[in-house]
Amino acid sequence: MDIDGPQNRPPHNSTTPGGAKGPWVPDGVVIGIAILMAVTMVAGAVIGITWYQRRDTDDAASQPVEQAEQEADGSDPTTSQPNDFELVECPAGTEEAICEAAAFVQNVRQRPFKTFPEVELLESAAFNEALLEDYDEGREDIEHAELAFKALGMIEPEVDLFDEFRNVLSVNVVGFYDPETSRLVVRGEDLNLYVRSVLVHELVHAFDDQWFDLDRDYDDDEQAYGFAAIAEGNATRVDQAWEAQLSDDDRAQFERDRASSFSLEDLQRLQSFPRAIIELQTSPYTDGPNFLNAISATEADIDSLLTEPPVTSERILHPEISEQQDPQVTVDPPDRPNVVDDGKLGEVVIRQLFGAEPAAGWEGDSYVVWSQEGKACIAADILVETEQDLNELTAALENWKAEQPGRSSVTLSDSDTFGVSFTNC
């Protein structure tokens, strides 16, 4: 385990919400290789799985709701600008529901769109075609991520992630925004209340892209996750604010509209998808808003975070700790032959593997993956902060080892460094 040395890593085709992407990702779709998240992290998509997974983040939505209510009463919302602003004009012929959603987003974000975003409403077949236009180009990246997930024991050996993702995309994605093309697309030509909430979410991405440029790449997996959590956390808190201001009758209709958007077969397909990957997929949509709520983020704060996002998942999961107080430690990738990919697990993946307590002492890590005699292999080095953290992670690793004979681990500790290394094929 080499610490604080140069990483000398090749560019990593990680991707981030808002559409910053590697060479193969479909327009507007984020298949996040970052933090092993080879998952359908659509740029702002309100995904079906959050129907029964989303955490209670009503507090995070309270501030934008108050602002929206002020606007509805005719009073001026508090703005981060020196002067009051005027909403950007809604183009003639635009559906009223789209104009209203755009007005809500502008009042919450406290400034106007630079230009009114064009919204495409497509029926399912056309939507899927747009969503999957370039999907086949991503086979290699998906296969690399599949190796890592299988080596970690997070998916079964027989799972074909490339096909699984394609299947889930057809039911999991309700809308997307692609900052590379400024294309905003929503599934469904009927703007019911559920589709409007999706529209609000996507419009937030369009807004943030116009002001802060979401079309960006991060070679570092952890920073890619930090950006994902802020971008998706912001869009989620605003769409939740929109939902929160509905009347009781409209709220009941919203739930009916959401339920009707997914058939029993759709939900069964989502539920059969590997659970560990689903939890990683939804983390920016849940932990992102929780982070913004915990720090009582103002619109100005969110602007700053979009400009300079947190550089670790640890910062998102522990908002009480600043990156200056607990900086990430650089760990060189393990030295193994025939490596096909490398990156960082980060606290969010280690949490998924071993639980919150063993992951909480994370200080830095690096992993590599390869294929050996038809088996998926991984080697990882993880640093933790204290001897107690080391004991907790070591105990979790011992349990992980016991699940499969081929797994191995070693505990490393000295006066300055606490860490573990593990391998599995």
Image (cartoon, rainbow, N blue to C red):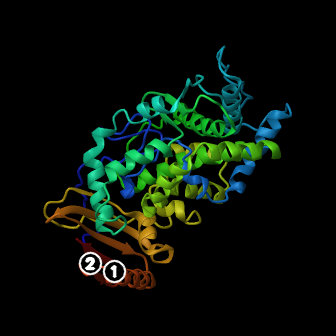
- Residue at mark 2 to residue at mark 1: CA–CA distance: 8 Å
User: Where residue 351 appears, x then y in whole percent?
Assistant: 46, 69
Position of the C terminus by quadrant? bottom left
User: Where residue 97 appears, x then y in whole percent?
Assistant: 69, 28
Position of the N terminus by quadrant? bottom left
Give yes or no for contact between labels 2 and 1 (Cβ–Cβ under 8 Å).
yes
Give the farthest residue toward the top: 92
Label 2 crowd (10 A; few <14 / some 14-19 / many >=20)? some
- Residue at left 58%, top 42%? 303
- Residue at left 44%, top 83%? 392
Residue underneath mark 1: 403
Q: What element carries label 1?
A: loop
In the rendered image of this protein, does residue 159 appear above or below residue 168? below
Label 1 crowd (10 A; few <14 / some 14-19 / many >=20)? few
User: Where residue 75 appears, x then y in whole percent?
Assistant: 84, 33
User: Where residue 323 appears, x then y in whole percent?
Assistant: 49, 61
Residue underneath mark 2: 407
| Amino acid carrying mark 1 in the image | Glu
Q: Is 133 or 381 nearer to us in this picture?
A: 133
